[in-house]
Image (cartoon, helix red, strand yellow):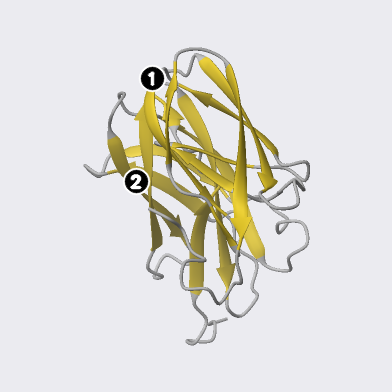
Amino acid sequence: MAHDQKDTISLAVWNVPMPVIAGEPFSIKVGAKSSAGRALSGCRVEVSDAAGAVVASGTFVDAPWAGTEALYWTALDVLAPRAGQVADYTARCFPAESSAEAVASRFSVTATEKPECTLSVQIKEQNTAEALGGVEIRLGSFHARTDASGHAELRVCKGGYQLHLWRTGHLAPPRAIRVDGDARIALTMLHVPEEHPDARWVR
């Protein structure tokens, strides 16, 4: 039975670590959804590197992702590249019909040496001293997000960094820090109206 010609498949890659550890495997999730809602269980999935070599493969599980009706997925392990390298990958889903074209989605990773330090970050609002959850923290290629108590931990390599914070309706200037071992740092963000021209990521 032929499928509706308007039926299209969209492919997504998520849970990509930031960064990955050089030379070690990292896990990602790949999922696809049919616009017509048809089952995609058993469809083959491949991940290839920039040179086109297949570095991981698998098939979608039998049941859709919990809470969705038609998002079929699989978890794949990919070997990270050498340290200091940004590597590009392409995930492809091959529909069961031999005549159907594969659909693709691209993603990138940055590989670093294995982190040896833990940086504990506590973030509060500047005027109220209330804990700020959901703050995006960027320290070079290392990323984290604060929990409801305004706390986050990052495993990082030793060295100097520019620390950036982002949260809708809040501002904090970039801050230069140096990490030489395990450390704790307390920061504040200033609340500004969301329509304020500076209520955005400060780069």
Could you say whether the residue bearing mark 2 is in a helix, strand or loop?
strand
Name the residue type under label 2: Tyr
- Which label number is shown at residue 183? none
Mark 1 in CB contact with mark 2 (< 8 angstroms):
no
Question: In terms of image quadrants, where is residue 1?
Answer: bottom right
Residue drawn at x 49%, y 62% as measured from the top left: 11
Binning the other alpha carbons within 10 Å of mark 1 as few (below 14), some (14 to 19) or many (20 upward) gives some
How packed mark 2 is, by other alpha carbons closer than 10 Å (few <14, some 14-19, many 20 or more), is many
Which residue is found at the position 28% from the left and 39% from the top? 53
For the residue marked with disc 1, what is the amino acid? Answer: Glu
Q: Identify the residue position indicated by label 1 in the image.
A: 113
Q: Quadrant of residue 75?
A: top right
Q: What x and y, as percent, mark residue 79?
A: 41, 28
Q: Is residue 29 left or right of residue 163?
A: right
Vertical arrangement, residue 199 with respect to residue 171, above or below: below
Judging from the image, what secondary structure is the residue with disc 1 in? loop
Instruction: Give the residue displayed 62% in from the left and 44% down from the top.
Output: 188
Front in this rendered view, residue 99 or 162 = 162
Please tell me which residue lies in front, 148 or 62: 148
To which residue does mark 2 refer? 89
Up/down of 85 relative to 94, above or below: above
Q: Position of residue 28 (x, y in %)?
A: 53, 42
**Observer-nearest of 194 and 91:** 194
Q: Is residue 15 visible?
A: no
The mark total stands at: 2
Q: Nearer the viewer, mark 1 or mark 2?
A: 1
Spot occupied by residue 107 in the image (x, y as percentages of width and height): 39, 50
134 vs 168: above or below: above
- Whether residue 34 is visible, yes or no, is yes
